[in-house]
Amino acid sequence: MGPHRRGPALLLAGGVAVISSAAILIRLCQAPSLAIAAYRLGIAATLLVGYDLARHRRLPPARSWPWFASAGLFLAVHFAAWIASLRYTTVASSVVLVTTNPLFVALFAWLLGEPPDRRTLVGIVLGLGGAVLIGWGDFAGGPAPLLGDGLALIGALAMSAYLTVGRRARAGLGARTYSTWVYAVAAVLLAAAVGITGTSVGPYPPPTYGWLLLLALGPQILGHTAINAALAHLTAPAVALAILGEPVGSTLLAYLVLGEVPSVSTVAGGALILGGIALGLGGAGKRVTGRSRSP
């Protein structure tokens, strides 16, 4: 890896390490899932928007807002679905499944007329097999874990779209500016969802407000903003691959903090998913490299 890539790569690694704590903080919050998502984005957006307006005293150009709107929508769906999944399934299952987005990126490309090569196809099959294995293992726990697995996969689909949009939208926009207004759009959409559904916004036990603040400052402002910054220098598949480190950190923290021991099926399914994605992205990387060398 060249020197010009090391900085973004280290930034991305730090961001992934920070977001690994998100699932644990969410589990510690005694609040409805949708409210947790709204508070997380709301606190982060309020702090960043206030800073951005104080510094620039103007809104971003009009041409940027369609990007903010689309990315914010996908981010809102991602958090609403994924945070809800943690109420129904284990941290390990939820985080492993929500980070399967590289598989969906490859599948989307296939549907759009770019068939995968053999390595990518084998990677997709392995990854989907791993997801089925996790779901099959959770089936023994009743219907709720399967609902959680499904919500985590919806979160993965939304994150796939978010990363794809972000890679294109980040051109010409600073990471902080882009993150600020995408978070703001997502916060407004989640607040609207809270109002429409009649979700309780409090009062909650006092410790919950501390966990919500940490969730906004750590995984959201530090973690996700670092990932957005990396998108300006690294491809969306490379960033998605790095995010696969999140299940490792989250599962370890779940064991240490919550006493959750991952099942054999979760470990085996997670290994299949991670191996499948690594294999698939290896094939995709060769195709991208080959195209970049052609005139």
Image (cartoon, rainbow, N blue to C red):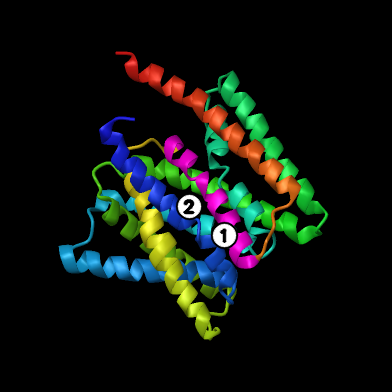
Q: Position of residue 280 (x, y in %)?
A: 55, 28
Quarter of the figure with residue 219: bottom left
Q: Position of residue 94 (x, y in %)?
A: 63, 54
**Badge 2 or badge 1: first in the primary sequence:** 2
The magenta segment is 237-258
In this figure, which residue is indicated by the disc labeled 1?
253
Q: Position of residue 10 (x, y in %)?
A: 35, 44
Q: Is residue 123 left or right of residue 283?
A: right
**How many residues crowd mark 1 within 10 Å: few (<14), some (14–19), many (20+)?**
some
Q: Quadrant of the C terminus?
A: top left
Is 224 situated above or below 47? above
Query: What secondary structure prevails in the magenta region?
Result: helix
Q: Is residue 276 left or right of residue 244?
A: right
Q: Residue at x 27, y 56 (%)?
A: 177
Q: Residue at x 29, y 42 (%)?
A: 7
Q: Quadrant of the N terminus?
A: top left
Quarter of the figure with residue 46: bottom left
Res. 41 in view: no
In this figure, which residue is indicated by the disc labeled 2?
74
In the image as oriented, which residue stretches furthest toward the top? 295
Kindly report the distance in space between the C-alpha atoms of the residues bearing marks 2 and 1: 27 Å
Res. 217 in view: yes
Determine the secondary structure under disc 1.
Answer: helix
Q: Amino acid at mark 2?
A: Phe
Q: Is residue 238 magenta?
A: yes
Q: Amino acid at mark 1?
A: Leu
Q: Residue at x 51, y 66 (%)?
A: 37
Q: Residue at x 69, y 54 (%)?
A: 262
**How many residues crowd mark 2 within 10 Å: few (<14), some (14–19), many (20+)?**
many
- 17 or 229, which is in the foreground? 17
Q: Position of residue 277 (x, y in %)?
A: 56, 34
Determine the secondary structure under disc 2.
Answer: helix
